[in-house]
Image (tube, grey):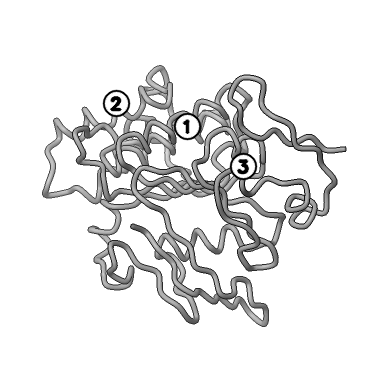
Amino acid sequence: MLQLRDIRVDLGQSTVLQGVSFSVEPGEVVAVLGPNGAGKSTLLAVLSGALAPRTGCASLENRPLSKWSPQALARKRAVLPQHSELAFSFRVLEVVLLGRSPHAGVSSREKDLAVAKAALAETESVHLADRIYTTLSGGERQRVQLARILAQIDFSERDGHSVGRYLLLDEPTSSLDLAHQHAILETARRAAERGIGVMTILHDINLAAMYADRIVVLHAGRIAAEGTPDEVLTEAMVHHAFDLSVSITRHPTRGCPHVIAI
């Protein structure tokens, strides 16, 4: 389990997160929602080990993240940031192979290539393999970066080998067209089916309702609600967290809540 316990984070003079306890279990998709400035990206940074909290503890498998070596932690959890800067003229396959760096010395070139190609296939990016990364559109780059982190945690492994590995996605659908927004979240669901724990920050409430097992709503640096989509997505909660009046209906085919602004 990847877990935060009673986290507090101060940035400058501001308290960004206060009293936050949160976990991601193997085999589930957790969506984190909240208005701008609620602390979503900060929560992800603490959960990934990139940012140390002022108080509280971030742990993986009941071991503080600070006690993991960078290489071992990188084999267990991978992070897809909102923006990934890469100015070098690497080919796409080479970019995906960068995800295999934590496996140096414990993997082979043949396996690394096989894992990278499987990750490209999962993200519908095989046709981009020989393209220069810097010539890609924003949406294509996002899919390639997703393939890179899938390769990092051995997404292609089956038979329980993925249990205890985690994907942390920071607004992964932001630069994608409608079809690829659903495709990336379907990948998240397939990852969960393989035992991978997935946390994704989303702005689209309805995407969260469709794909998440559990939703966490952040508001003013605290957890305002946590539970299944049906438990969390109420008209009162959405109004409280987003200052927006909505009507909650049912999705016509999936049966999950569907949020309509009024």
Amino acid type assigned to the residue bearing label 1 in the image: Arg
Callout 2: few (<14), some (14-19), or many (20+) C-alpha neighbours within 10 Å?
many
| Front position in the image: 206 or 130 | 206
Q: Residue furthest right?
A: 262
Residue 238 falls left or right of residue 128: right
Check the image and report above or below for 61 versus 245.
Answer: below
Residue 164 falls left or right of residue 220: left
Cα gap from disc 3 to disc 2, whole angstroms: 35 Å
Residue 82 in sight: no
Can you identify the residue that label 2 sits on?
118
Can you identify the residue that label 3 sits on?
230
Q: Residue at x 29, y 26 (%)?
A: 118
Instruction: Determine the secondary structure under disc 2.
Output: helix
Check the image and report above or below for 212 versus 118.
Answer: below
Check the image and report above or below for 117 versus 33.
Answer: above
Callout 1: few (<14), some (14-19), or many (20+) C-alpha neighbours within 10 Å?
many
Percent position of residue 158, x then y: 22, 32
Amino acid type assigned to the residue bearing label 3 in the image: Asp
Image quarter hosting the N terminus: bottom left
Callout 3: few (<14), some (14-19), or many (20+) C-alpha neighbours within 10 Å?
some
Can you identify the residue that label 1 sits on?
143
Instruction: Determine the secondary structure under disc 1.
Output: helix
Badge 3 or badge 2: first in the primary sequence: 2
Amino acid type assigned to the residue bearing label 2 in the image: Ala
